[in-house]
Structure formats: structure tokens, C-alpha cells
Image (cartoon, rainbow, N blue to C red):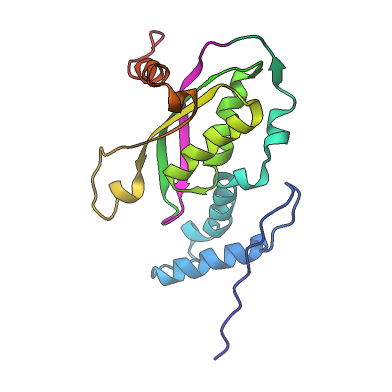
Amino acid sequence: MTVPSIPTFVPALTTEAQPIVSEAEMEAAVRTLLLGMGEDPDREGLRDTPKRMVKALKFLTSGYQQSLDELLNGAIFPEDLDEMVLVRDIDLFSSCEHHIWPIIGKVHVAYIPNGKVIGLSKIARICEMYARRLQVQERLTAQIADALQGLLNPQGVAVVVEASHMCMVMRGVQKPGSWTSTSAMRGVFSSDARTRQEFFNLISHSPASR
């Protein structure tokens, strides 16, 4: 019996790198999954499911095709500030790399400038770029913090992610309502307890605008 070869993953060096698996091959894999579930992929309701699922998966993992340079588009500006900048309650939608099931939650990001600031919408886009990859929450939290630290060289960066994992809610231990919190502290947020506490105080209450 011939064992089918498994494509080797090659990390993309640029956002224009060609995929090593075609959409047709991905759709054929979805069709195989449907057959394995005992379904008929040719029945009317499932006929276009492989195409739709591949399109959805490519959207949910579109962060692999993005780079920080393209995302920022020059939105870093000189500014003589040294007070905390906080963007909180950024919606998070990611996918667990163990089951490819949804991770849904919020991200809170703060930094203290050191001669440079970043466009506020870019903070949300950085979170989105890393979220739209297969993830574990701990790594996602660190990636967001490290990206901002590398881009701005600020006095410090703080990131907290609060999320619910559908692989815990809908299967396995089946615990709806459970949330996971992770944090990544860089620079002054790591070394200064008062600065760190100020950040946690700011994200611990509901915004007045709600």
C-alpha cells in the first residue's frame, strides 16, 4: 500500500509566498472528513461545504499572510510623552492549534512611550494579525507584547488576554463560562509594581462609555 506523502511546512519569507497546498487539495481533504463522519458530501446541503470551509479557514488564518511592515504602513510617530497609553477590550477571535476550534475573548494592551507612539488602530490590527493564526493563548499574548516592544522600544509594554476556549466549553471537560487569563509584561511593567498595578486597575472596571 502506498502511503501518501505529507507536504512539509515551509515558513513564508514574504507575504507573497505561494501556498504549498492548492485550494482544490484542501477541498478534497474536507470532503474526506465529511465521508469519515458518515456524511454524503454530494447531498445538496453539503455540496459546497468543502469550498466554504476552505474559504473560512483561510480567512481565520489570514494572519500568516500579513507582516508588521505592511500592517503599520508608517503609522509610528515621534512624540515626547511618557504617560501610559491603553487600548482595552479589543475583541479577540482566534483558533486553538490543538483542535482548530474558536478562542473568543478580549485583549488589553498598554505601553509607555519612549519618544515614539503608534496609531491606536494599529494596536488592534497587531492583535488581529497574531490572532488569525493557529494559536495557544500564552504564545499569542507574548507575540503581541514582543511586537510592540520591538517596534517602539518603549519604556514598557503590558498585554492581558482574557478568553474562552471552545475546546474546553463544547468538548473535553465541557465547562461553559470558564475563562483563561494570560499576561505579558515588558520593561517598566515588569520591574515596577506600581506601574503594573495602575495598568491592572485601569482594566478592572467597565469603561464609562458603555
Residue visible at 59% across and 19% down in the picture: 120
Residue visible at 29% across and 54% down in the picture: 171
Q: Which quarter of the image is occupied by the N terminus?
A: bottom right
Residue visible at 30% across and 49% down in the picture: 168
62 left or right of 93? right
The extreme bottom residue here reads: 1
Q: Residue 72: where, in percent of width, then height?
A: 69, 29
Please say whether residue 89 is visible from this viewpoint: no
Q: Is residue 78 above or below residue 124?
A: above
Q: Is residue 83 magenta?
A: yes
Q: Is residue 106 above or below residue 115?
A: below
194 left or right of 4? left
Q: Residue 189: where, in percent of width, then height?
A: 45, 24
Q: Residue 104: where, in percent of width, then height?
A: 40, 38
Q: Residue 187: where, in percent of width, then height?
A: 51, 27
Please say whether residue 37 is visible from this viewpoint: yes
Residue visible at 74% across and 48% down in the picture: 14
42 left or right of 7? left
The answer to which image quadrant residue 18 occupies is: bottom right
Using the image as rendered, state which of residue 181 and residue 56 is in the foreground.
181
Q: Which quarter of the image is occupied by the C terminus?
A: top left
Q: Is residue 200 magenta?
A: no
State which region is magenta.
Answer: 82-99
Q: Is residue 99 above or below residue 150?
A: below
The answer to which image quadrant residue 26 occupies is: bottom right
